[in-house]
Amino acid sequence: MRFEEELVELLPRLRRFARGLARHASDADDLCQAAIERALKSRDQWQQGTRLDSWMYRITRNIWIDERRAAGRRGVHAPIDDAATQVAGDGAAEVEAGALRGDVDTAMAQLPDEQREVVMLVLVEGYAYREAADILEVPIGTVTSRLARGRETLMHYLGEAA
Amino acid sequence: MSFDPGTIAAFVDGELDDLTARRIEREAESDAALAAEIARYRALTAKLSAHFAPIAEELVPERLRALLVEPGVDTSMAARRNAKRGSFAPVHWGAIAASLVLGLTIGLRPWAPAADIASVNGRLVASGALADALETQLASDQLANAEIRIRLSFRDRQGRACRSFEARDLSGIGCRDGGRWELERAIGGRGSQEYRQASSGELSAAAAAMMAGDPFDVAAERAARDSGWRN
């Protein structure tokens, strides 16, 4: 299959992953667009016979991390975080009281970036720990510990029955 | 409970070696706290899968597709390619039934033609060993190396009992309807290229998308089986 065709087939999953990272649909599609453009530009770096999906997820995730860091340096809070952090900031007790129970997006927003990406890769995209570690270029132990902390937080916010 | 959270997580994520997985399965039968903990982990995965699954079903925005599909490409072709993108799109039985049954027959038991899938009134239903597994096998009580492995059991929005399963040549979801197990979703088995690409997460996601409420826990699964999977 042609490189472009394979990418087209990947798009639905990639959009889902991007939505987990960036959350707002339009931000997520912007992220996908940037990832596709970078992939097309650096297609020589993809080695035939290796997994295109892992390669694409890595590109997507790296662009996202770069953007978040750049926004952080500029002192800009990405607008996507405002709703969640405000609620958590001045209403931690409400959260405890269960006001936000059951909202997956809100629960995911509580996670630090490095936990959210692991949760997305393993629990939503179904990657094995080893594959997630390869995509994120971290040791497998880092994947399991971030996943454990992410899970704990999600179960807390989503209630006992998750 | 003699397993730490990391081990339970690895079990639920399918990351344990068979031996340890079997030990946990056995122990969960008599250890209610362990069984509850496993159910809690599974419920979180199912909830996340269900939440995000619809995004992968959306039509990909044209501005993204346009980056990859050459302009001038016949749009009906493009639409068709878009439509067949998901391994778990509802199965178009007419087109693939024959090859599926054939593939399964060759792969699984060449001497027993189409033993595990039959066509009844134009619907594909489980038969043979697959029907037996769906009818009687408990996810909480199966060998790690079982030929057919049951994963999740749940009720769909029509109130039918449904179960996702994995076998070497076929994985999918069967729902009990009129005394039979109709195949609602199917992809190649866990040994196939197609399945490795789709990954078992897609199976969970497909199940989560069909599910009304939470997946059955150990007790609910047993109770449902013992009552004959009645609606």
Image (spheres, coloured by chain):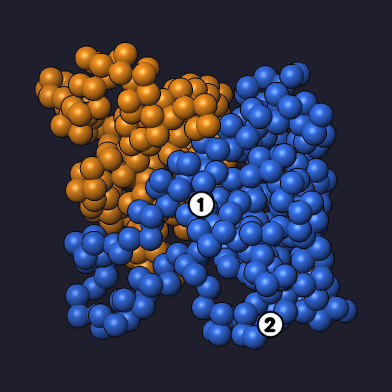
Chain colours: A orange, B blue
Identify the residue under disc 2: B119
Q: Is residue B87 left or right of residue B55?
A: right
Q: Report whether residue A23 is seen.
A: yes
On screen, residue A75 above or below B119 = above
User: Which of the two labelled residues, at mark 1 and mark 2, occupies the earlier sequence position?
Assistant: 2
Secondary structure of the residue carrying numbered label 1: loop
Q: Is residue B60 left or right of residue B92?
A: left
Numbered label attached to residue B212: 1
Dot 1 falls on which chain? Answer: B
Q: From the top left corner, tell me how far across and down residue B87 is, in percent.
A: 50, 65
Q: From the top left corner, tell me how far across and down residue B181 is, in percent.
A: 69, 68
Which mark lies nearer to you, 1 or 2?
Answer: 1
Neighbours of disc 1 within 10 Å: few (<14), some (14-19), many (20+): some
Quadrant in the picture for the C terminus of chain B: bottom right
Q: Look at 61% across and 51% down and name the residue there.
A: B154
Q: Quadrant of residue A78?
A: top left
On screen, residue B68 above or below A126 = below
Dot 2 falls on which chain? Answer: B
Q: Residue furthest right?
A: B111
Q: Report whether residue A59 is seen.
A: no
Label 1 and label 2 in one chain: yes
Q: Amino acid at mark 2?
A: Ser
Q: Look at 77% across and 26% down and name the residue there.
A: B31
The front one of B72 and B207 is B207
Q: From the top left corner, tell me how far across and down residue B212 is, in percent.
A: 51, 51
Q: Amino acid at mark 1?
A: Ala
- Please state the total of marks drawn on the protein image: 2
Q: Look at 58% across and 54% down and name the residue there.
A: B155
Q: Quadrant of residue A68?
A: top left
Secondary structure of the residue carrying numbered label 2: strand
Q: CA distance from mark 1 to mark 2?
A: 27 Å
